[in-house]
Amino acid sequence: MSQREYHIVVLGSGGVGKSCLTAQFVQNVWIESYDPTIEDSYRKAIEVDGRHVILEILDTAGTEQFTAMRELYMKTGQGFLLVFSITSMSSLYELQELREQIRRIKEDDNVPMVLVGNKSDLEDDRAVPRARAFKLSQEWGGVPYYEASARRRANVDEVFVDLCRQIIHKDRDQREALERRGTRRPQGRGDRRTRRNHRPRCTIL
Amino acid sequence: MADLILETDDTNKHASALVAPLNIHKSPKRSRSRGPGHSRQSSSRGGQSATSQSHMSPPLTPRTSRDSLAEQPSQPVFHNYLRAFYHFHPSSTVSSSTDESSITVPINQGDVILVHSVHPNGWADGTLLASGARGWLPTNYCEPYDHPTIRTLLSALTNLWDLVRDGENGDLVVFMKQDYIRTLIAGVRFFLVSQKQPYLTAYRMSLIVIKEKTDCLTRESPLVVAHVGLRRMRKGLLGDLSSLVKTAKKLQEVLQSNDSPGLVFGRLDELVLKAFKLVTRAVRFLDIWAQDAVSLSFDMGEGNNRPLTPPSDSADLAVQPPATSNHDDVGSVQANDEAASVSQASACVTRELLDHEATQPRNLARLSVAFSIPSDSDALQSPLLPPQPQAQAKRLSVTHRLSYTGKSQSTRKHNLASERLNAAHDSFLGFIGSFIGLHLQSRSSEELAVTTQESVIACRNLLAVVEEVWERDSRRSEQLEQAREMMYTRLAELVQATKDMFSSSEAGMGDEVIMPDQGKQLVIAATSCVRSAGECVTKARLVIERIGDFEFEYDEQGLSHSVFDQLNQNRLGLDQPQAAFQVEVPSQPERMLEIEKPLPPPPTDDRKLLPPLVISESKPLPDVPHSPSTSNQNASLRPSQNPCAESPVATSVRSSMSSLPHSSVQHNLPQLPQPSASDYSQSPASATQRFFGKSIRADSVNASVADSSSTCRYSMRGETASIVSQTSTRATTPDQSPAKKYSAQTLVSSFGSSSELRSVASEDVEAVEEHLLETTYSHELLYNKDGQVSGGSLPALVEQLTLHDSTPDTSFVTAFYLTFRLFTTPVELSQCLINRFDLIGDSQSVGIPVRLRIYNVFKGWLESHWVVESDSAALGIIFSFATGKLRSTLPAAGKRLAELTSKATEIRAGALVPRLASSLGKTGVSGSVFIPADNTAPSSNMNRSQINTLRAWKEGRTQCSILDFDPLEMARQFTIIESKLFCTIQPEELLALEWMKKAGKGVNVKAMATLSNDLTNLVTDTILQVEDVKRRAIVIKQWVKIAGKCLELNNYDSLMAILASLNSTTVLRLKRTWELVSAKTKARFDELKTVTDISKNYAALRQRLHDHVSPCIPFVGMYLTDLTFVDAGNEPTRQLPGESGEDGISVINFDKHMKTAKIIGQLQSCQVPYRLAAVPEMQEWMESQIQRMHSNKEANPQSFHRQSLLLEPREPPRVVKAAPPPVSSSAASTMTAKDRFDMLSLSNYFTNNAKDR
């Protein structure tokens, strides 16, 4: 099977630790020095369910204030990692808007997506109850919810792999749909149903 | 023979794990094993005081045949240092006995142990260098450790230990009743003052040797990895050394302040521990080095079959088999390499030997077991390899092959004049180092004599090489000659100093104590000797460079041949002197003179020759008659192509005098058994022989090992061979000019100048120490693969900032100034700089340059990197430094710095320009900013009517549209606005994610983001405001044009902002509009899209920015992301590589800050104002438009999207293709009432505007 390349966009308000999450993921082997300015700083080959895929991750951490640029970033993504910090309720709220924008741009209610509550190591400072975040993920149509810690490298790979799996499934479904000349929508619903069957889930470490 | 046998069979191992293992054998394993119970008994009985007396067992016949080994009772062996080759962890550290002295220490493989005593049962009282723990340990788990490279260091450590112990036991016990503290302090102070420096010098010397060898190695080594390891170890070594110096200084302080004795002891302990650590590290260094050497040599040996010089090569091969068999027959001597190493026993061992003549058996045993790596090439065998007598014969051949391989490499290397020069210099430094280190410690005069002679020998060897180089030089470099002269003089001086010392010690204190004053003189003489040697070598190298390197080998005839021999000797320099001394000290100097004789005779007046040392009075050793040295002259002049059949094996065996083999070693193809035999048969040296015969022989064997090109060493198997004294060996060196006997007078006359040179010499000692301080923290630095500093402690980084010998790297300095507040505070930095100022001293060579650099750091900080808010806390410290310490040493600098501080104070008070730091960043990392002077602002593309329109707009009479103006002019005006803002961004706004913080410093960065957003929104808005689809297409075309002009102006930020709009779903979905956009515009648009493509981490954009020409406004967002990821992806600290897996200390991850600074530097390099003429009317209009967007709450993606839907409602998928794009009115008809209302209210402004036009 040919090696596919998927684009993942990491979104979230400033200070939720997106960049740490991404940096941890792309440099899983301890690298003495991480240089984010080279072309493949954000590319990573992984294996998901036996398929070798290349993930190109777009994380525009640091440019959150360039709100007008956001759409440009979102356009490229096939899957989205929506990251908030469990220590900040507002960071969760801000995701709502981002999700709406994604849906609008993609004209799709069923975009591959993962909700990530970062900084799970700071349990003492938790401001977002786990149930609250999980509820939101359910409202979003059963989007998987993970709590991760970039610092402790907990659930870092998992969130990316989960997202990648969703993209692969969608990709496959779309191909099949194309072959059958079916429309996207019913397919999407079917997909969502399957998603609901296997999830809801809330993975917490 | 008296070799340790490593007990490796399982049963023994198990036994030893439970009980004290005690398996020291001479030979076949099981023959001598003692019961564990026995050993326990004896070990507890032994006690700490199991010193040499306990070893006064019956004399061991030196070098008896191998058969006799079995008969010998197992003989405890003594070495100053042992190295564990197997771990030993006793089940309990305290044995059944309650006696404290029976504590056993656990040892790990590779541990080096300083042995205080060895009990006959095989247990040794030792101190682990790694931990400083003292206790009993089984010697059978250890092997003797001695390595020529590190020997000086080891013996220096022994001396230090003895000294400290003497201070604790001797001095204290004796003087406690009277004036305990004062005596102790006096003793230690004496130790410090008179001995510390030389002691350190000795360390330094040995380090030099190590380093130079390593340098040689790495130059050729393909193993870069190994290089890194070595480099790290070297750094660590230097670091330990510097910390040792510091401890010594502290000790000195404590002593001076007459503090409590407890403190003194504490310091002493610290000192000893530091010294231990240093040695431990040095040992590790050697290990790594040896590994490299091994792999290297195998590479060379196998891959690079460069043959030796044919004659010697064939001789070697031919001789080898008989030699081996010979060896087996006789079987008396250890494998050659091992026997050879006997002579390596350091000066300490020799001293012991002399001190305790009564205990000679033990000493001999010690000697014979001393296992070391005699030379470079032999170091190829790992020093960890223990001798294995069982496999003697086999090992012999293996060893031989090994050394052969190694030698073929090293021979090749050493044949080059330059290499020989280096080798000779190395060995000279090694000896002179040990000389300095050993003396001035109240050591016995014998020892002094030994080392003096060693030094003299080494010195002369060096001179020999220099001489040859000089000879070679057709121009007869005067400089070299002078340097050589100077070295002669210094050498003579050194000898004189030693002589003086002996005469006085004879008269006064006896031979136990040497007065410190004399010691100083000696050190002065020695250091000046080092200095002149250094000069000499430098000059010689220059000459070599000029005349080209030459190989001695290619010229086998005549003079150079003899020099070659001489050089062979030089290479053995490490081994020979001791042995020579053991034979007969007093006559040694003269022999050395003889060695020199084969050199081409220089002008007579050049020669200031050493007289024989007149130190024999102090030595109880019997005189050895001076052997005639001319006998071999003819032989040496013979061409070396003698057939191998004539190799001396037979002859030497025949003749009982073993000098033959050695003498033959001296020549590539020896063929002179008869004459030398006859010559040396006279050398009686009977007394010497009795005691030292063994070591002498060992020495000669060693010599031959070192020179594998002539393997005749095997021929000296003969038992009686040991009689031959070193004297004769030396004497066999061909003497070209027997007539030139050096007279004592010549030498004495040269002594006159010594006093003048003393001051110079003392400076030199200081310089050595300064040099140490110069690199105090270098071990706390990390480098990346490009050689840039990637990490380090603050003092180490400060040190890097203020190196004495090199201008600091610009990018390093810039990064430091920019980011230091992230890892330290201004106060801390100031203190650190001042500490360095204090520590470095004020010498011309090091101190002054460093101090000036420190001043420059302060100056640069105050002048262009001062950040008032954070840095003013340090102002007071800097001011008092400027007016105090700095002014007293560098008055002008102090004055200037004081001025700067007051200026900075004024700034704080708001008197001057708000920020000196406004110039910050113009020292940007990524190069200079260049604007051609003739680049005048282009005239604006505005016509009168356009200006008038704008004026009318201002008066509120009309509305303007972007379509009214020239795209280029609009791009220009927008660029001016943007550039103004961009240029105000301060570097510190970009640090530590300041721009992300709500109340952070990044105000201008935030403003940039806002401007960018507003521009995007403005573009979207202007497009969506137009109801007419055709007109909308024209607006899009206009924006594409403006974007294109922005690209031409290098205004990437505006380009990105415009594209973000044009490329957004809101605009892109207006399919009907786009259908009306011309293909040309679309093509242009596609072009711009590729430029601003964010995929592949902005690859396209980065490429353009990389080659940008300033002025330029890069897309700031990209840099912000980079900075964020540098912060997130790199830890603030990194670990120094620990030793053998341990974690080192964590230091500042400066690489992270370098990266940050680099990104900021790139951004700063763009911060150049555009040479564009502003059109105020247009600027005003634009700003108002931007402001409108800014305050418009509807300017958000959501409402824009809604607007977009109103303009061109979403169409059923099929219809799009089927029907041609409907006109806008039909689109409007599909809207809901609410949508329509929204659209109207929102697009009010633009609808009006459109109508106006």
Image (cartoon, coloured by chain):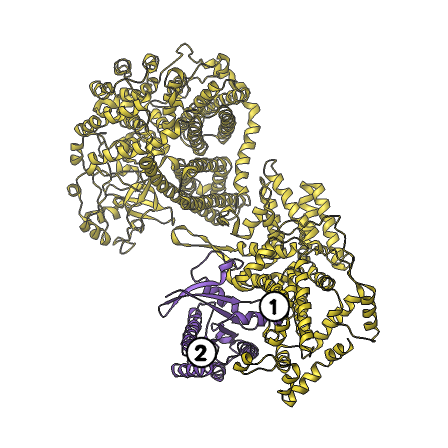
Residue B922, how many percent across, how many down?
Answer: 68, 52
Element type at marker 2?
loop
Instruction: Identify residue type, mark 1.
Output: Met
Q: Is residue B761 visible?
A: yes
Measured in 3D between alpha carbons, the distance from the residue under mark 2 to the one under mark 1, in whole angstroms, is 28 Å
Q: Which chain is purple?
A: A
Q: Is residue B997 visible?
A: no
Q: Is residue B745 above or below residue B818?
A: above
Instruction: Identify residue type, mark 2.
Output: Pro
> Relative to the observer, which residue lies in front, B486 or B165?
B486
> Relative to the observer, which residue lies in front, B704 or B1106?
B1106
Residue B955, how many percent across, how many down?
Answer: 84, 74
Q: Which residue is mark 1?
A: B996
In the picture, the disc for residue B446 is: none
Q: Which chain is yellow?
A: B
Q: Is residue A10 above or below residue B826?
A: below
For residue B1223, which quarter of the picture? bottom right
User: Mark 2 Cα within 10 Å, few/some/many (few <14, many 20+)?
Assistant: many
Chain under callout 2: A
Q: Which residue is mark 2?
A: A144
